[in-house]
Image (spheres, rainbow, N blue to C red):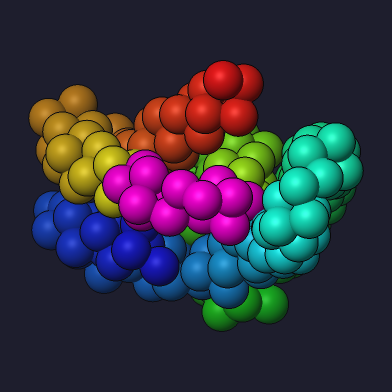
Amino acid sequence: SLYNLIDRAFIGHMPDVGINAIAGLTSTFPFMNLSVAFGAMIGVGASTMVSIYLGQRNEEDAVHTLGNAFILNIILSIITSVFGYVFLDDILMLMGASENTLPYAREFMEIAFIGNLLVHIYLGLNHIMRASGYPQKSMYITLTTVAINVILAPIYIFVFHWGIRGAALATLCGQIVGTIIVLQHFMN
């Protein structure tokens, strides 16, 4: 939600297209939330199991649960991305896009689907990180991804003139960094 609010703030100031671009971005929000919910669902469920296993000092099953969550997030992200690409215009129209706003929504979602795998992995593993004894690190990673989006969105939108794709790319960059940090944490 923070990513979306940040993107809206900057997209709203785009000359000549702000209103239609914001409306287009708004129509992406339900599908983005659904995708994020799948990643979080796996992470929350797995984090509960990891926490129980670690409490029992059963590190082997905790590691297996982590691996299963990782694989399940990859599978689910691929399914949602393929489904989303195939039915993108229909989904966006169902979510409220119009003929005027559809091109903006499509531009944003095409980039978002590229990062869908990262979102699933990042959110899923971030929940497990929190439950395995690193809640502050998890929070700092989340804040870092948001800060990256805040810094890069205006640069990509206004300096590079990438418009709504720039907003999506700024979000994607934040998610890439978050995913790398979370993966490094668990590899260590």
What residue appears at the point 22 percent right and 45 percent down from the top-left corner? 147
How many dots with numbers?
Answer: 0
Q: Quadrant of residue 172?
A: top left
* Quarter the C terminus occupies: top right
Q: Is residue 166 left or right of residue 131?
A: left
**Residue 69 appears in view:** no
Q: Is residue 90 above or below residue 115?
A: below
Residue 113 among magenta residues? no
**Residue 3 appears in view:** yes
Q: Main secondary structure of the magenta part?
A: helix
What residue appears at the point 59 percent right and 50 percent down from the top-left corner? 132
Q: Is residue 183 left or right of residue 169?
A: right
Residue 132 among magenta residues? yes
Looking at this rendering, what residue extends furthest in the front direction?
57
Viewer-closest of 146 and 10: 146
What residue appears at the point 60 percent right and 29 percent down from the top-left corner? 186
Viewer-closest of 151 and 160: 151
Residue 45 in the image: state x and y as whole percent: 76, 64
Residue 30 in the image: state x and y as whole percent: 58, 73
Q: Is residue 187 above or below residue 186?
A: above
Please give the range of residues in magenta: 126-141
Q: Is residue 72 left or right of residue 33?
A: right
Residue 3 in the image: state x and y as whole percent: 35, 57
Q: Quadrant of residue 104?
A: bottom left
Residue 12 in the image: state x and y as whole percent: 19, 63
* Quarter the N terminus occupies: bottom left
What residue appears at the point 56 percent right and 79 percent down from the top-left corner? 96
